[in-house]
Image: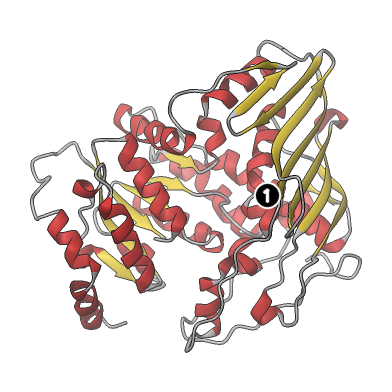
């Protein structure tokens, strides 16, 4: 879309309404307001924007960007209608960007903080640009979909710390009182003694959403539109969703795994053409080995008509057991109480407080390690081979297409076959 057409479109659509909701100069005198840009205006971007506005009265949204016009319009409609947030939606046609380069324009628009909520395949590129600019970051998980992306992210850890950039990741359990108190009891009080076994689950009772191709879409446009089904964008559901549970395991154990063994996984739903249906699996069963020989069992599933749905973390110790899930935490059948603020809001409160206090949170290392934990499991299941942490980190797999063309063709690889798919 040309600059002229973009402005004409936005002025004639919902952006005009946003300008009315946030007239010029409404916050001009509020020098302490934190200006936020949102990159990726889909469901998670809209949710994160509302979460940060709900939790922080001194925050306003001043720039947004996405590759799709309809995501922009939906963002404005959803964020702009809420009583608690509409007066702080301060975007204009000049600070609303559409296209593959929208992320850079948002970052360069004068914002203090960016929310990164595009499909995960783009995360390393967007993180790199934000760290280079020196803006604070809320990044959704996962932060990469392959080893090449992880290496890029890990290289940003020290640079972001030197620049005093606050970075909070969308692993919201780390900001949830029930999890914080429970894990403190496990680690500091040895509430279940020495932890000897664990298992984590993200087992859904149905499959993930699927968005059909719209008329006139190029391959690249369709794949980004239906991003969950393509590895270069999603990383498979073990990386996109199960990373939450694996992050809790790394947190409890104070380490990332050394090896992934016994990887099993596959795809139940049919795939007539991976260019249409995608190539991700819908179930994984893995065994992770941590230092001192600790074994973690890992399961995730997205298959219709399966039950029960289980999204939990369990740990067994020499003096008892612990069970954790969103909203419920038990140590030896004693319930640990949660807090009054939901984790999706609390993580944004913690981020903004760290910016204002200059006690900068930086969660990039831990979320990168949890993401690689999930990537290693995917590699193990795809190939049917054991894999070490070093092998996963040094893998030459790089799924991001070179010279990505918005209107271009893009062939998709076949569904992986354990025992035949090779390590790269």
Q: Quadrant of the C terminus?
A: bottom right
Q: For the point 78% across and 20% down, which residue is it? A: 321
- For the point 50% across and 82% down, the residue is 214
**Percent coordinates x, y for residue 168 in the rendering:** 46, 40
Question: Does the rendering let one see residue 234?
Answer: yes
Residue 142 against residue 75 in the figure, above or below: above
- Which percent across, then down, holds residue 386? 88, 52
Regarding mark 1 in the picture, which secondary structure is present there? helix
| Residue, disc 1 | 372
Q: Nearer the viewer, residue 199 or 399?
A: 199
Answer left or right for 77 relative to 361: left
Residue 99: give x, y in percent of width and height. 37, 73
- Few, some or many residues within 10 Å of mark 1 (<14, 14–19, 20+): many
| Residue situated in front as seen by the camera: 95 or 397 | 95
Instruction: Looking at the picture, tell me which residue is in the foreground, 291 or 214.
Output: 214
Rendered view: 378 above or below 398: above
The quadrant where residue 292 appears: top right
Report whether 33 appears left or right of 253: left
Quadrant of res 95 = bottom left
Res 403 visible:
no
Seen at 33% across and 56% down, the residue is: 78
Q: Which quarter of the image is occupied by the N terminus?
A: bottom left
Residue at the far top in the pictured view: 189
Residue 186, x across and y down, in percent: 69, 18
Q: How is the image coloured?
A: secondary structure
Where 69 sits versus 41, above or below? below
């Amino acid at each position: 879309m040309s600059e002229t057409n973009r402005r004409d479109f936005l002025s004639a659509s919902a952006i005009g309404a946003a300008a009315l909701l946030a007239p010029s100069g409404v916050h001009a005198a509020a020098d302490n307001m934190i200006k936020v840009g949102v990159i990726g205006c889909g469901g998670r971007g809209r949710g994160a924007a509302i979460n940060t506005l709900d939790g922080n009265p001194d925050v306003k949204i001043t720039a947004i960007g996405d590759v799709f016009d309809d995501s922009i319009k939906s963002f404005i409609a959803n964020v702009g209608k809420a009583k608690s947030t509409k007066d702080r939606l301060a975007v204009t046609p000049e600070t609303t960007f559409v296209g593959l380069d929208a992320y850079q324009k948002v970052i360069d628009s004068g914002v203090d903080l960016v929310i990164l909520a595009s499909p995960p395949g783009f995360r390393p590129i967007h993180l790199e640009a934000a760290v280079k600019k020196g803006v604070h970051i809320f990044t959704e998980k996962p932060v990469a979909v392959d080893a090449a992306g992880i290496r890029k992210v890990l290289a940003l850890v020290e640079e972001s710390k030197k620049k005093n950039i606050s970075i909070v990741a969308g692993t919201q359990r780390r900001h949830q009182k029930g999890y914080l108190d429970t894990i403190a009891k496990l680690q500091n009080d040895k509430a279940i003694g020495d932890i000897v076994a664990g298992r984590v689950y993200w087992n859904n009772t149905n499959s993930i959403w699927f968005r059909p191709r719209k008329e006139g879409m190029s391959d690249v446009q369709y794949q980004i539109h239906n991003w969950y089904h393509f590895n270069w964008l999603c990383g498979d559901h073990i990386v996109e969703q199960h990373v939450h549970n694996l992050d809790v395991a790394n947190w409890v154990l104070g380490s990332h795994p050394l090896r992934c063994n016994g990887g099993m996984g596959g795809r139940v739903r049919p795939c007539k053409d991976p260019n249409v249906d995608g190539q991700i699996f819908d179930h994984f069963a893995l065994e992770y080995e941590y230092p001192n020989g600790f074994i973690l069992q890992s399961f995730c599933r997205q298959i219709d008509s399966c039950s029960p749905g289980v999204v939990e973390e369990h740990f067994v110790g020499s003096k008892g057991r612990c069970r954790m899930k969103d909203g419920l935490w038990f140590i030896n059948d004693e319930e640990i109480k949660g807090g009054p603020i939901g984790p999706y809001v609390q993580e944004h409160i913690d981020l903004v407080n760290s910016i204002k206090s200059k006690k900068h949170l930086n969660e990039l290392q831990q979320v990168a390690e949890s993401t690689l934990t999930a990537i290693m499991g995917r590699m193990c299941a795809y190939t049917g081979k054991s894999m070490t942490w070093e092998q996963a980190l040094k893998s030459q797999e790089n799924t991001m297409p070179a010279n990505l063309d918005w209107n271009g063709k893009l062939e998709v690889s076949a569904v992986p076959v354990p025992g035949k798919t090779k390590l790269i």
